[in-house]
Amino acid sequence: DDDNDLWIKQRLEALVNQQITPQQLALDMDRRITALVRPNRDDVPEPHHVRYFIGPFFQALTKCCSGFPPYHPGQNNLIALIKTLNELPRHIVPEGLSPAEIEEEPWKATNIWQACAEAFDFEYAYIWAPYRIRSYDSAMARLTCAGLINCAFLSSLRYILPTDDEYPDLTTRPIDGPNKIGNNLVGAAQWILGPEECRYAYTECQKVERVDVRQRKLWSREHWAEWKRQFAFVAGDERFAQKYRSVAAQAHHQMITCEREEELRQDV
């Protein structure tokens, strides 16, 4: 680890242990990033130093997201940190070969924040334990529906679609098949169980009839209906462990509740 890595890891650890607040860390990062933008010997700023800090920061943060269950204080602080960073005034990072050719680019520009989802994508490949997948999906769902980082294309909701390659055939895999579907379902449910998350998913799904998941698109009325069927299927099938059936029943109930609430709003 270099100095930047140590700085990031020590402060994230302090954050999730509630030794510092999200606001304190956000301001510390703000000062750190400002200090990293230094002119070189030719009086040309070197913004790549900032990128070497921001990349490792989001990689470390995504690792932390898999370590805390839904709405745990540690997860709450991580979400609050990103929200606070997003609300900070923009910093201008001059970029170019000479002062006359400088192209100004905010370090916190939209494209950089959207690229943060790729850090989640990179980390997702290393998460196999079911409880960590649940935690990861929960954090991604909260970030997505808050409009901070769009991680929808990584949602475990896609893995409980029968058309997905990860969906096992229960007739040929009667033992591990239900467990695989169940584990993916627990992660998928994190996008549904919370009223805010469910409302976001429902609203997005109502915008289009169907999508091509190969293009990283997830939300559609077709998928909403299929997820609802899958939750009902698992909830009522004794081949699945009770822990999976319980989560499925809760998610199915939440989807029905969300639909009814939307119908009532439209009738008003």
Image: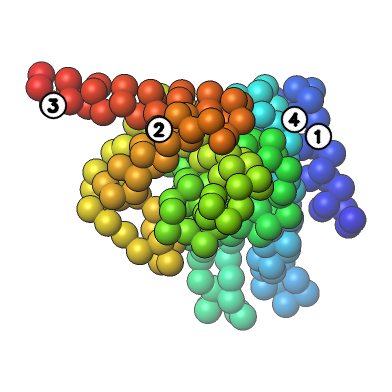
Closest to the camera, between mark 2 and mark 1, is 2
| Residue 212 in view | yes
Identify the mark at residue 45; answer none if there is no mark: none
The one nearer the camera, 101 or 262, is 262
Name the residue: 79% across, 45% down. 8
| Residue 96 place in picture, x, y as percent | 58, 76
Q: Quadrant of the C terminus?
A: top left
**Marks 3 and 4: which is nearer the front?**
3
Q: Amino acid at mark 3?
A: Gln
The amino acid sitting under disc 2 is Ala
Say above or below: 21 vs 148: above
Q: Closer to the camera: disc 2 or disc 4? A: 2
Q: Position of residue 256 (x, y in %)?
A: 31, 26
* Circles 1 and 4: CB atoms closer than 8 Å: yes
On the image, the x and y values in percent for residue 15 come to 74, 30
Determine which residue is flagged by label 3: 266
Q: From the viewer's perspective, is 198 left or right of 129?
A: left
Residue 36 figure quarter: bottom right
Label 2: few (<14), some (14–19) or many (≥20) C-alpha neighbours in 10 Å:
some
Q: Amino acid at mark 1?
A: Glu
Gap in angstroms between the C-alphas marked 2 and 4:
39 Å
Between the residue at mark 3 and the residue at mark 1, the CA separation in whole angstroms equals 46 Å
Position of 49 relative to 195 (above/below): below
The residue at which mark 4 appears reads as 15
Q: At numbered mark 1, what does the secondary structure look like: helix, strand or loop?
A: helix
Q: Nearer the viewer, mark 2 or mark 3?
A: 2
* Separation of marks 2 and 3 at Cα, in angstroms: 26 Å
Mark 2 vs mark 1: which is more N-terminal? Answer: 1
Which mark is first along the chain, 4 or 3? 4
